[in-house]
Every structure is written in C-alpha cells, then in structure tokens.
Amino acid sequence: MKKKIQEAIGLAEELVKRKNATAEELERLDRRAKYFQNERLVHLITTAFVGLADMIALAVFVIAANYAALALLAALSALFLAYIAHYYALENGVQKLCDLIDKLRDR
C-alpha cells in the first residue's frame, strides 16, 4: 500500500512541476485518492478494534495475571503498534496526495 501511494504522490508532484495536467490525469488521481481514502477508513476501523482488543487483553492480564494473558497482550500490542505505524503512513500519504491534487485543480 505504501508503494502505491508513493507512486501516486510522485505522479502528482510531476504534474505540479509540469504545471499542466489534463482532465484525464486529474480524474485518474481523483480515483486513486478516493481509493486511498476508503482504505484509510478501513484501516482506522481495524486499528480501533485492535486497540480495543489490546485494552481488553490488558484488563484480562491485570485480573488473571498469568502467562497466557501476557502472551495475548504482547501479541496484540505488537499488532496494534504495527497498525498505528501503517495508519500513520497512510494518513500522511493521503493528505499529501489531496494537497497536491488541490494545487493542480487551482491551476
């Protein structure tokens, strides 16, 4: 996903440098931006649920205080941190892409 969004950003930056974009190129960037925005929403929901599961695992560990609960907590915490990192990159990429598309539309 990160590679795809970087390709779209590269294309948009190239069009901004050229200072001219056809309607077809703008439409293509718009479609990609909408796809990435939908992807961002899915990852936000997934990240929220994994975070909730992580908090529940923490509560279970505090109550049960056994190794199985600790293993579950460690696994969910690692997954949650990975989702946070991925969502952060996706969010920043989509915002940058949308800003570039706005620059192109203003011209």
Image: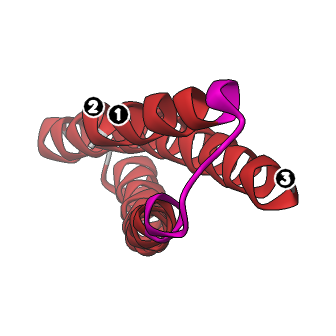
Categorize mark 3 by other alpha carbons within 10 Å: few (<14), some (14-19), many (20+): few
Instruction: Give residue 79's quadrant in the image.
Output: top left
Question: Which secondary structure class fits the magenta region best?
Answer: helix
Position of 85 with respect to 92 (left or right) is left
Q: Residue at x 43, y 75 (%)?
A: 38
Residue 39: where, in percent of width, then height? 38, 67
Q: Which image quarter is the N terminus in?
A: top left
Q: Disc 1 designates what residue?
A: 7
Indicate the secondary structure of the residue bearing disc 1. helix
Residue most toward the right? 106
Amino acid, disc 2: Lys
Indicate the secondary structure of the residue bearing disc 3. loop
Q: Which residues are magenta?
A: 16-27
For the residues bearing labels 1 and 2, Cβ distance under 8 angstroms: yes
Q: Disc 2 designates what residue?
A: 3
Q: Is residue 105 visible?
A: yes
- Between the residue at mark 1 and the residue at mark 3, the CA separation in whole angstroms equals 22 Å
Which circle, 1 or 3, is nearer the viewer?
A: 3
Q: Is residue 59 visible?
A: no
Amino acid, disc 3: Arg
Categorize mark 1 by other alpha carbons within 10 Å: few (<14), some (14-19), many (20+): few
Residue 4: where, in percent of width, then height? 28, 41
Q: Disc 3 designates what residue?
A: 107
